[in-house]
């Protein structure tokens, strides 16, 4: 599906959340959950800096939706995210039965950037969200926002290298 202006508005907010996370010492990822009627239900961002590397916004959103939404509401909701779900978050998304994902950057693209910058392989394999959850609708990337996200990821890499 092509991205609409509404999709881009939500994705822009995800990029803002990602920037906020980066500026607070976390990794640049931000996500939000939108109901079938277009209401933003919850937004969150990466919070791994204290050492818990499962603190991804997409996992928090899946857990929140399991507590607060019916099965039907979850299926009709959309998760917007600055970067496509990792396998952990995609699995949580699939287990709670959430709907469409719209990502500013796809996982394959982020992996290419990190490889080109000489980053080590991640601890968890990279998979597209619809490889983890068969039949899941995943849209994106949004090229202009992906360019912005590339800058944020590059800053994260340089910050971590300066600390080593
Ligand atoms: Zn994740």
Image (cartoon, grey):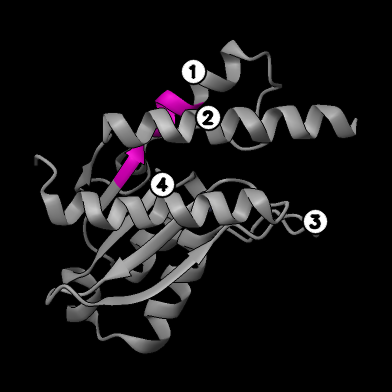
Q: Which residue is mark 1?
A: 112
Q: Earlier in the sequence, mark 2 or mark 4?
A: 4
Q: Earlier in the sequence, mark 3 or mark 4?
A: 3
Q: Earlier in the sequence, mark 3 or mark 1?
A: 3
Can you tell which quarter of the image residue 103 is in? top left
Q: Which residue is mark 3?
A: 51
> Which disc is residue 30 wearing?
none
Q: Nearer the viewer, mark 4 or mark 1?
A: 4
Q: Which residue is mark 2?
A: 151
Task: Kindly report the distance in space between the C-alpha atoms of the residues bearing marks 3 and 4.
Answer: 21 Å
Q: Nearer the viewer, mark 1 or mark 2?
A: 2
Give yes or no for residue 160 being in the magenta stretch.
Answer: no
The residue carrying mark 3 has its beta carbon less than 8 Å from ligand 1? no
The part of the chain drawn in magenta is 103-110
Callouts 3 and 4 close, C-beta under 8 Å: no
Q: Is residue 125 visible?
A: no
Residue 154, image x, y percentages: 60, 27
* Left or right of 10 on screen, residue 111: right
Q: Nearer the viewer, mark 3 or mark 4?
A: 4
Q: Is 106 rendered above or below residue 130?
A: above
Q: Residues within 10 Å of mark 3 (few under 14, many from 20)?
A: few
The residue carrying mark 1 has its beta carbon less than 8 Å from ligand 1? no
Pick the quarter of the image with the N terminus. Answer: top left
Q: Nearer the viewer, mark 2 or mark 4?
A: 2
Q: Earlier in the sequence, mark 3 or mark 2?
A: 3
* Secondary structure at numbered mark 2: helix
Task: Kindly report the distance in space between the C-alpha atoms of the residues bearing marks 3 and 2.
Answer: 24 Å
Q: Is 82 rendered above or below residue 71?
A: above
């Amino acid at each position: 599906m092509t991205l609409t202006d509404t999709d881009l508005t939500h994705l822009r907010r995800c990029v803002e959340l990602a920037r906020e996370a980066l500026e607070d010492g976390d990794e640049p990822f931000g996500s939000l959950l939108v109901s079938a009627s277009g209401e933003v239900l919850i937004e969150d961002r990466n919070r791994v800096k204290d050492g818990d590397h499962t603190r991804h916004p997409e996992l928090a959103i899946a857990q929140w939706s399991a507590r607060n939404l019916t099965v039907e509401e979850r299926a009709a909701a959309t998760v917007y995210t600055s970067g496509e779900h990792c396998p952990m978050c995609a699995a949580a998304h699939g287990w709670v039965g959430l709907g469409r994902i719209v990502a500013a950057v796809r996982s394959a693209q982020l992996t290419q950037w990190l490889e080109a910058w000489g980053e080590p392989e991640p601890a968890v394999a990279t998979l597209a969200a619809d490889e983890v959850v068969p039949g899941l609708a995943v849209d994106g990337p949004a090229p202009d926002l992906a360019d912005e996200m590339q800058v944020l990821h590059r800053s994260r890499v340089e910050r971590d290298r300066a600390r080593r």
